[in-house]
Amino acid sequence: MATKPLLQLRQALGDNLTGVNESKQIIVDGCFCCNSALYLEQPGCLGVSAKGELCCLEGECCIKPKAPPISKLYCIDLRVTNFQLRLKKQVQYCCCVANFALPPDNEIPITFAKFGLQIYPKIGCCQTQGVMTGTMGRL
C-alpha cells in the first residue's frame, strides 16, 4: 500500500513517479539494452529524477517543480519487492535521459541508434520511442 505522499506524487505525475513518459523520449543513441534520449515535454523535463531496480530492491528520486515529498526522506523512496532477476535504471537531468534494462522490457526496449539515426526497432531519424515501438501513449 502506497503512503499518502506517494499517492499525492502519483496523482501529480501519473503512475510513473519520475514523471518521464518513455513513449515521448527521442532516442539519440541506443545499443541493445541501454539508450540515451532527449525528453522535451514541458514541464516534465524540468528537474532531476531517477529510478532503479536491482533484484528485490527498488529506488526512486524526484526533484521537480510542484512534486510533493515521496517519503520521510523527502525526495527519495527505497523499498524491497519480490525477487526478480533484473537490473534497470533511468536517470533524467532536465532534457537528457539515460536508460538501461537487463533484460530489456516495454519501458526500456532494445534499440540501435547513433546521433539520432535509428535502425531498430524501426528505421528513422529523431523519432520518439513511442513511434519506434508502436506504443505511443501506452507506456
Image (cartoon, rainbow, N blue to C red):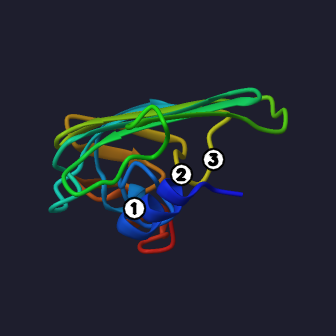
Q: How far apart, in angstroms, are the residues tagged by discs 3 and 1?
A: 13 Å
Residue in the foreground of this view, choosing between 58 and 20? 58
Q: Could one spot residue 60 in this view of the protein?
A: yes
SS label for mark 3 = loop
Q: Which is nearer the N-term, disc 2 or disc 1?
A: 1
Mark 2 residue crowding within 10 angstroms, few (<14) / some (14–19) / many (20+): some
Answer above or below: position of 31 versus 127. above
Q: Which is nearer the N-term, disc 3 or disc 1?
A: 1
Q: Are the residues flagged by discs 2 and 3 in contact, CB closer than 8 Å?
A: yes
Q: Is 83 positioned to the left or the right of 16 in the image?
A: right
Residue at x-position 19% and y-position 61%: 41
Q: Position of residue 112 (x, y in %)?
A: 42, 38
Residue under label 3? 105
Q: Position of residue 1 (x, y in %)?
A: 72, 57
Residue under label 1? 23
Tag 1: amino acid:
Ser
Q: How far apart, in angstroms, are the residues tagged by discs 2 and 1?
A: 8 Å
Numbered marks: total: 3
Residue at x-position 63% and y-position 47%: 105
Q: Position of residue 115 (x, y in %)?
A: 20, 35
Residue under label 2? 107
Q: Position of residue 45 (x, y in %)?
A: 19, 51
Residue at x-position 54% and y-position 42%: 110
